[in-house]
Structures are given as structure tokens and as C-alpha cells.
Amino acid sequence: MRTLTFDLRYSPIAQGDAVAIVGESTTSELPGELYWLPLTPPANLEVSLLARRHNRSAAVDRMLDAAAAIADELGWI
């Protein structure tokens, strides 16, 4: 079994073992030794969501509905 944690310190990146492509909204909480470097020219990356077809929790259904509505509002779909 694989366990995952959310590392707010971005340890692998801070240690030089990884890079991360993140949205600009994450830049306000970066640790002091890290900085955000925008891609020039800006890049458009496809984002997909993966969820079970059946037996999903109500929270997952609400999140998928919200994601679809926001994507539609922004003209992404």
C-alpha cells in the first residue's frame, strides 16, 4: 500500500530533487528558499480529473459538478 502526504515545505523541491509546475495561486505560501518562475511564453496545460464511475462519495460528485461548472464558465469546455 502506498501512503501519500501533503508536504507544505515542498521538501523534494527545496532539496533539489524535483521541480514542480504549479499555478500562480500557490506562490503566496512558498517557503523562503523557493521562488516562482513564470513560464515564458506562458504555457497551457491540459488538466484532467480522475474519479470512479460508480460508488463515488457525495463530496466527489459535488467537486466534479463544481469543476465542470467552473470550466464551462471559463470557456474551457
Image (spheres, rainbow, N blue to C red):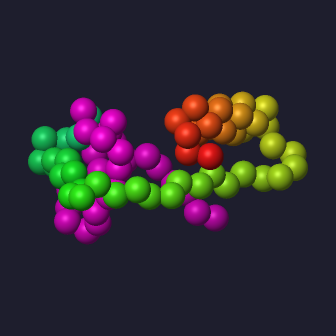
- Location of residue 29 with respect to 13 vertically, above or below: above
- Location of residue 11 with respect to 8 vertically, above or below: below
Left of 58 or right of it: where is 64?
left
Left of 7 or right of it: where is 76?
right
Q: Residue at x 26, y 68 (%)?
A: 17
- How many numbered discs, if any? 0
Left of 42 or right of it: where is 35?
left
Considering depth in this image, is 5 or 55 the residue closer to the camera? 55
Considering depth in this image, is 72 or 46 the residue closer to the camera? 72
Q: Measured from the top left, where is residue 19 in percent x and y?
A: 28, 63
**Main secondary-structure element of the magenta-colored stretch:** loop
**Which of the 4 image quadrants contains residue 61?**
top right
Q: Measured from the top left, where is residue 37 in percent x and y?
A: 18, 52
Task: Say if the magenta span includes residue 18.
Answer: yes
Is residue 70 in view? no
Considering depth in this image, is 9 or 60 the residue closer to the camera? 60
Task: Say if the magenta span includes residue 65.
Answer: no
Q: Which quarter of the image is occupied by the N terminus?
A: bottom right
View extreme (left): residue: 33
Q: Residue at x 22, y 51 (%)?
A: 38
**Which of the 4 image quadrants contains residue 13?**
bottom left
Q: Residue at x 66, y 38 (%)?
A: 68
View extreme (right): residue: 54
Q: Measured from the top left, where is residue 73 in percent x and y?
A: 58, 32
View extreme (bottom): residue: 17
Give the magenta range.
1-28
Left of 55 or right of it: where is 2?
left
